[in-house]
Amino acid sequence: MIFHIFLIIIAFYLLATLALTYLVHQIPREPVQCHPDWGRVLDTRIPAVGGGELEVWRIEAEEKSRGVVLLAHGWSRNRDRMVDRARIFGRMGFTTVLHSARDHGGSSRKRFMNAIRFAQDIETVMDWINEPVLLYGHSIGAAAAVIAASRRTAQIRLLFLEGCYARTREAMFSLYRNQNSFLGPVFAPMVLLWMDIFYRFRLDTVSPVRLAPSIDLPVLIIHGGRDQNFPLHHAWRLRDSFPAGRAELFVSLGSDHSSSSLDPIYPDVLRAFVERHFPA
């Protein structure tokens, strides 16, 4: 009798965690609305990997462009989420390109999005731009930017990583624990195991700290001092994983996971980094 009860509990746990594995890939979706209010805006759609389309904004510089900045949003958001960040680069004279990843915003649906597929979308837009870019990513968009940079270092001039995690499994466990301090630790290990099985045990092979040593580029890491999703130690470890002297870290002490760009000195930090490594 006890053995049967134990089997029922185990079966319920496995089914519950399998259902949660599906749900964390699907919800929530929280697109925002914030349209570009500078430059000449091209609103278009381009073919995505495996079919479907990506919605893309290309905002041309007011005068002669210094180059192209490609910005990638985080989980559950859309291209609009990066408009305020893009505006700063626009004021520096750059053309900016913003897209919504598949299954986000107005882009085509795609089940089971992850950092690898976010990176595929970044690379699709890079091919469409067809010239070297400054690449900026936030959260999972930052992790995807690292993946793209590890594959296409020669096509990227500068790399900006905001709210990026260091190791995939550790970051996901931190997210689940942050959502619920009791249920997170109980269900997260099995959810992560299901993901490992689903992704053929490649979760940590694309961890930013594992890819960073091969990326010989100037990198600016931006992190909130009060980031509870990915605490500050992620940023320190990521910085130290890049080739010596290539990565700089800006910590916005009062910011959480998504508000570093609201820090009053954030625009100056971006400008100073760009002028040091990509002068006009």
Image (cartoon, rainbow, N blue to C red):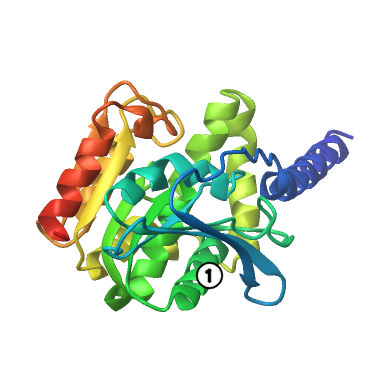
Please report the residue visible at 19 percent of the width from the left and 59 percent of the height from the top.
218
Given the image, on which type of amino acid does mark 1 rest? Gln
- Residue 130: percent from left, percent from top: 42, 79
Q: Name the residue located 48 percent from the left edge and 50 percent from the top edge.
A: 140
Q: Is residue 205 above or below residue 25?
A: below
* Residue 170 sits above or below residue 209 on the image: above
Quarter of the figure that contains the C terminus: bottom left
The residue lying toward the viewer, choosing from 273 and 280, is 280
In front here: 98 or 218?
98
Residue 93 picture quarter: bottom left
Residue ID for mark 1 = 120
Q: Quadrant of the N terminus?
A: top right
Left or right, residue 142 beside residue 157? right
Q: Nearer the viewer, residue 94 or 40?
A: 40
Measured as percent of width and height from the top left, residue 248 is found at 17, 47
Residue 164 in view (yes/no): no
Q: Secondary structure at mark 1?
A: helix
Query: Which residue is at 43% across, 28% downward?
Result: 228
Q: State the image coordinates of residue 276 (x, y, percent, origin top left).
A: 11, 54
Count numbered badges in the picture: 1
Lateral position of residue 31 relative to residue 165, left or right = right
